[in-house]
Image (tube, rainbow, N blue to C red):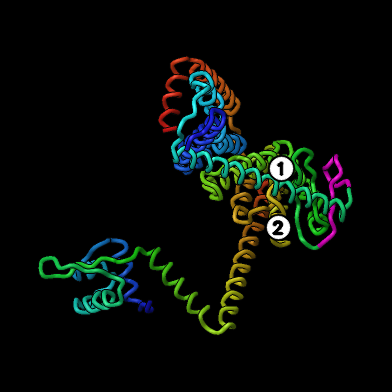
Amino acid sequence: MEALGPLEITVMEILWLHGDGNVHDVTQYLQRPLAYTTVMTTLDRLYKKGLLERRKAERAFVYHPRFSRAEWEQKRTGEFVAGFLAAPQTSGQMLISCLVDAVGRHDEALLDELERKIRLRRKELARRRKP
Amino acid sequence: MTLPYVLRLLCLCGASFFLLHLALGLATVLVTPAAARWAGRMRARQAARFLLVLRLSPAALSALAVAGLCAPSYLLLEPASTHEEVSMWCVVSALLCVMLLAFSAVRCVRAARRSLGYIRYCQMVGRQEHLAGESAPVWVVEGSAPFLVLAGILHPRLIVSRPVVNALPVRQLAAALRHEDAHRMSRDNFKRLLLLLAPDLFPAWRGFAALERVWARFAEWAADDDAVAGDSQRSVSLASALVSVARLGACPQAAPLITSLLADNRDLAERVDRLLRDVPLESGGERKSLAFRVAGVLASGLLLALMAQPATLSSVHGLLECLTH
């Protein structure tokens, strides 16, 4: 699956949020004004990348996402991991090592946060005990 | 397949058990998300009891129906001298029932053996010590793996590793030991054995895994609640103990019939948050529990009265005839 640019991601977000839409609809939902042709080209590119499906309605294409956001993210992550693991052995080991480190850092951060909450609670209880 | 009288009875009982258990089990699996939400509104101890009953009910009700309806209707209404043809579906269902029960029995024996082996090992390498807040001696095991567990079914023992004893201040250690004591008082290891003994939907397919996970979570919460008994200081101590033990590293689940202070790190944040909240004084819990018991007794009485009716037995016999052919 090819990587997406910022505008492509924005367009996908709009279609995931609103479902179907033609070029005009997507242009309306964009937060910054963009040329009709720019949006049309972006939608066409996403269609060619296999992320959108389209049907003709009143001389214009109506686009809708082929995958839900969750499906797309799962596919992307799966391909990323598979790419790493398919590479020479060191790449796979590096990926697993990075994942373990990331999980460890996440755990440490979680435990720090829980300890902070416990300290706050202790202070609160101490305050309550004082007359 | 033509079977004699007694084998046909066994075959029909097995097939009836399998089909009833499958239907009730599927219904239980379907209502599990709603039951989990409902349990979330109860006190943890009540929720754990409710979920345990829900998990065991397909097997218990199926066994009751077979023992109270299928077997008596067959023995009373089936002519004893006849050899009858039994359908392939009936034989397959009976075989599946045998497999279900065999899987459960093997699982139980294996779990009991592993637990027994674990306890023996801990008793061999550890020694009994009197620790803070514990009147009974606790087995302390030297070694680097951090754990604090309750092991055993009939006579559960508290086993704690030296790193945990060294890392926890007296109050935290006492809170952690009270937590495991609460598991001992509520016989959670025996309940785990019952869960292993209760058959699955199909052989070697753990269809009730989600329900068992929710039960385990509520059982932990209930032990937390019992350990702190509404005391805010104890709550903070137990929360600190949980975080301290988590910092020591993963707590390996040594055997399926062992309750560990931190069996599942995924639940840690939620447990700590619960312990740090002000505990609301709930009323009406006992009344609700009494109402559940009364409803249970009434339902059982109604069921027994229904079973004793001749019309019920003849209807069941008709159903068994359909199953046979």
Given residues B43 and B36, the one toward you in this image is: B36
Q: Do tags 1 and 2 sit on the same chain?
A: no
- Label 1 neighbour load within 10 Å: few <14, some 14-19, many 20+: few
In the rendered image, residue B142, in percent from the top left (x then y), is placed at 85, 59
What amino acid type should be assigned to the residue bearing mark 1?
A: Arg
First to last magenta residue range: B129-143
Q: Residue at x 48, y 75 (%)?
A: A82
Q: Which residue is drawn at 34% across and 73% down?
A: A9
Residue closer to the observer: B310 or B12: B12
Work out whether residue A126 can be spotted.
no
Quarter where residue A23 is shown: bottom left
- Asked which secondary structure carries label 1, the reply is helix
Answer left or right for B136 relative to B18: right
Q: Single out the mark in the foreground, 1 or 2.
A: 2
Question: What residue is shown with label 2?
Answer: B251
Residue B179 pos. (x, y %):
72, 44
Residue B140 magenta: yes
In the image, residue B117 lies in the stretch drawn in magenta: no
Q: Please state the horizontal and vertical placement of residue B24, each as a whole percent of the image.
A: 48, 36
Tell me which chain the residue with mark 1 is part of.
A
Residue position marked by numbered label 1 in the rendering: A129
Where does the C terminus of chain B fall, quadrant-wise? top left
Q: Is residue B296 left or right of residue B246?
A: left
Q: Tell me if A89 is positioned left or right of B15 in this view.
A: right
Q: Residue at x 31, y 61 (%)?
A: A17
B297 or B218: nearer the viewer: B297
> What type of secondary structure mainly makes up the magenta span?
loop
